[in-house]
Amino acid sequence: MPAFPFRLRPMAALLCAASAVLSGQDLALAERLFRSGERAYAAQDHKAALETWGQLLQATPTSPFAPRALLRLARHQVEVELRPEAALPYLDRLRTDYLRSPEAAEGLLLRGELLVRQARRPADLKDAMAEFNRVLDLFPDAPACASARLQLGLAWRAQGQPGRALQSLVDAFRLHQDPRVAPIAMLEAARTLDALGDLPACLRMLQDLRTRHPATPEAAEATWRTALLVKHRLQKPPLRLEGPWPAGQTKWLKTPILLTTGTSGELLIYQNDLDQTFRLVDGDLKPAGPKVPGARVLFTAPGGALWVLTRSGLWRDGATAQAPLDPLGAICGAALDRWGSLWVADAKTAALTVFPSEGSARTVASPTPSALVALGDGSLLVASDTDRKFLFLDPDGQPRTIVPYGKGLPAAFRTVTALATDGAGQVAALVDGGDFGEGVLILGPDGTVLRQATLKALGVSGRITALALDRSGGLLLCDRRNDLLLRVD
């Protein structure tokens, strides 16, 4: 592709010619209008600032301050109005009319980032990736290049190309000195190395991140990830029962049957006798979401909102009625992926039904699912009791890895009751039946059994209906019969 597409050349040439003959008076007017808008914006008078920048665009569209005004108008829509779709017309004009301006690099980057937000499937990332590549091709020395390479790496990984993703992520922190981008790129590079099966390189990258950027949130996450990976993948200590959790709490719940973790790591517990979900915050239970009889699945949506599924529909936090998920009527599992799509398993349907945040539902071929969970990389894990297999699906629902029940165990099991993930690559499964019997497994991202134990060997005699992985790698078990939670580590 040429540096400046043919259709843009006439406008670019016109702007260059116009700026050459722009009068000193007009240039001074453009600068005064831009600075006036900046002062108003700094004083929180956003209305006056937007009007002033609008006047600048109308009065002096060929001045070098015009693309600056467009970029400021676009950022206001994204950061203050929280209406990213309203920013796109400004960014489209910036790309079309001012592609030779220095502000175009940041505008192209922002436009690509907004297109990523709008994506609902990996295939939808193509237009965003084109914008990131334009930044790199047209403005190779611009500060925006570091973020463009980071975003390209994430997009390549989402599209199932971890090798290309890793190269782009490494370039993002090796070729640029952006302290905001480097720790994020290093963390994502470590995650990509883990996806490629190179655990030693992943751990080295996490340690390098902690050394180079010790005061960043990414370094804190690197510390957490390192601890979990070492514990589950290298040390693999035998699972043992620690007892009721929190310590000393017994008979303090009313038939807990479902568990999940919130966006900030807090535990959510659904109590069947109360038809209510509760957040466990500092040892106290606080009601969360509406009362929902017959809950089958609960999870948190982006932003922290609680979603609860029954056999026939979905309750959203703040809603006054259940949303039916036609034509499903025997929902047995569900997961919300990173694209905002709800994947639902129905006990009577040999397929998964996907409900996107916008548009029509679609079905994805699958053996009759028994349980499923969304993984941190945008993929899903499905357990199928009919086929007795774990299926690791890519973001489009295509099988990436298939693992038979019982592989790596002394004996097989028949059913999977519940699944949970820790967000760092491990998955916990509550299983039952067969010679293995009722027990718990911790699986790696490729389905390898890392740690396992039967409930009998752990000394657990209650009725376990759900489980969750906590931040330190322990398993929390939901004991319906004894109205308590148990911790296994």
Image (cartoon, rainbow, N blue to C red):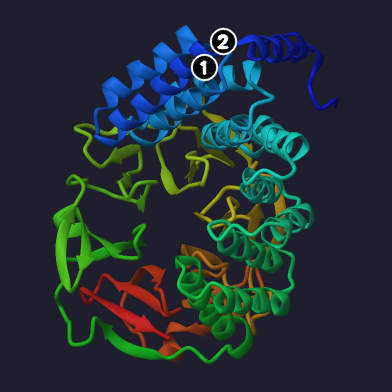
Residue located beneath label 2 in the image: 23
Q: Would residue 243 be found to the left or right of residue 27 on screen?
A: left
- Looking at the rendered structure, the secondary structure element under dot 2 is loop
* Res 285 quadrant in image: bottom left
In the image, what residue occupies the spot 26% across and 48% down? Answer: 294
Could you say where residue 377 lies in the image, as x and y percent from the top left? 59, 55
Residue in the foreground of this view, choosing between 4 and 456:
4
Residue at the extreme front: 24
Identified by mark 1, the residue type is Leu
* Residue 61, x across and y down, in percent: 54, 11
Say which residue appears at 36% left-offset and 31% top-offset.
Answer: 38
Camera-nearest residue between 86 and 44: 44
Q: Nearer the viewer, residue 77 or 349?
A: 77
Residue 473 seen anywhere in this rendered image of the structure: yes
Residue that extends furthest to the right in the rendered view of this protein: 2
Find out whether the residues at labels 1 and 2 contact each other: C-beta distance under 8 Å. Answer: yes
Q: Is mark 1 on a helix, strand or loop?
A: helix
Q: Mark 1 points at which residue?
A: 27
| Vertical placement of residue 142 versus 208, above or below | above
Quadrant of the image containing the C terminus: bottom left
How many marks the image carries: the answer is 2
